[in-house]
Amino acid sequence: MKNDPHPVSYDVAYASASELLERLEHSHTTSLTIVEALLARIGALDDEGVALHAIAAIADDARTVARERDEQRARGEILGPLHGLPVVIKDNIEAKGLPGLAGSTSLRGRPARDAALVTVLRDAGAIILASTNLSQWANIRSPHSTSGYSASGGLVANPWALDRSAGGSSSGSGAALAAGFSPLAVGTETDGSITCPASLNGVVGLKPTVGVTSRDGVVPISHSQDSPGPMARDVADLALLYGAMVGETPPSLLEVSMIEARVWRTGHVATDALFEVVMSQLRREGLAIAQGEGGLPSGVEYDDELTVMLCELVDDMNVYLAGRLGEGVKSLADVVAYEDENSQLEQRYFGHEFLVQAIGTGGCNTEAYQLARERNEGWARELALGKILADNNVVVSPAYGPAWKSDLVNGDNAKYVSASIMAAAVAGWPILTLPMGFVEGLPVGLTLAGRPHSEWTLLEAARQVEVVLRRHSDVSTPTWRAANRG
């Protein structure tokens, strides 16, 4: 509770989803009480106070749904595993009563429906509390962009140090969890968009195998890489939310066989040194972790991934925008025209070069796309992940260096990142991030990646790692360091 800027809400703000469920089940609290406490905290810290800007909009029906969940519980009608729990969702996911802007004012006034995954959450008993800000268009906009910034929502701050990046593109989801605005959040990832904000904000996140969670009603980038996924503050809550999203319960017997990728490091000296300490600690505590080599990307792989994403972006976005309810932009070309006409708002700090490039690719029905996709899949699935996972089912590596200072003029300084992030993204395979400690007073994470549909194995591996790490360090909450204080 030390340094917390809104101590009156602390008890609810940092209770786990599992703890809140237990309180609800024993009538020690109500869903309405929880929602009221979280809304008060958001009101005090998001637009005002420290001005975190993690929240895009509050759901108008949050209190009404909370009352309904309380009444249902009183009658013994439990809808599902999330009954009465608040969840925040990234604002590129459509939900009735929320904007669903993906950070762009070009989508204002376009009514949102419930995305398929939002329907699943509601059916599981969740209360959709709010939508969260993000990097505009999920960071597929400019090579000079700043993670966490959008024309519609401004810049998301990091609760650990307010002048530092919250990562992206699920910036608000990561920051909202760290700030105690919600016990559960949903993000989306194309390449790093769950793992990065999870690592930088000291929370946990899982990008499932592409196709496991529905993308219906989600503003797209790449059908070969996009995947909505759960985020939370601990592994148990992450598993709870993931299970609800896919309608599954954890298998009773899971065999975990971990291997460390020796060459997959972030390049940040202190982060990589901490990872070595953590690996030694895990091994001393009895976790068997082998060592092996994972393939590293070259400039060709980076170029190929961008080619694939831009080709898929123009095709996927054109279909999505044409089908979205209401009047307004109906194609990516319309978006570019709108942003040019409203450049003072939409291009205040950086342009939309990637959107323009995407339109010029010709889409997926081109030889350039097909060749790039084949090369990238071969690297990611065979040389990078397939090779190191030949005899094990979980590969361990660091995730990112600590959060860099946000810079709207020059863009991100996100150069410290493990190859595991790109490999899992390009392959379309699952990857999980959880906290491993602190560097320069800022949280850093490690990643666990696996073969397709190995999410429950990754969650079990994460549970084992978390147990050991928490045995040696207390769970802490953000320091809320002010800007220009280091």
Image (spheres, grey):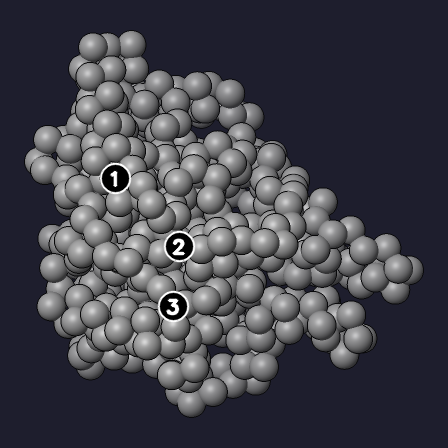
Q: Which residue is mark 2?
A: 257
Residue 423, quarter of picture: top left
Residues at discs 3 and 1 in contact (Cβ within 8 Å): no
Please indicate, yes or no, whether residue 24 appears anywhere in the rendered image. Answer: yes
Identify the residue shown where x is 55% and y is 64%. 236
Q: Amino acid at mark 2?
A: Ser
Q: Which residue is the extreme one toward the left?
A: 299
Give the distance between the C-alpha atoms of the residues marked 1 and 2, in whole angstroms.
Answer: 15 Å
Q: Nearer the viewer, residue 221 or 199?
A: 199
Helix, strand or loop under label 1? helix
Please indicate, yes or no, whether residue 170 appears anywhere in the rendered image. Answer: no
Identify the residue shown where x is 45% and y is 55%. 256
Number of the label disc, if any, that sits on residue 287 = 3
Helix, strand or loop under label 3? loop
Q: Amino acid at mark 1?
A: Lys
Helix, strand or loop under label 2? loop
Q: Which residue is mark 1?
A: 387
The percent coordinates of residue 15 (x first, y second) are: 58, 75
Q: Is residue 141 left or right of residue 153?
A: left
Give the distance between the C-alpha atoms of the residues marked 2 and 3, in whole angstroms.
Answer: 9 Å
Q: Amino acid at mark 3?
A: Leu
The percent coordinates of residue 25 (x first, y second) are: 78, 70
> Sequence-wise, which precedes: disc 2 or disc 3?
2
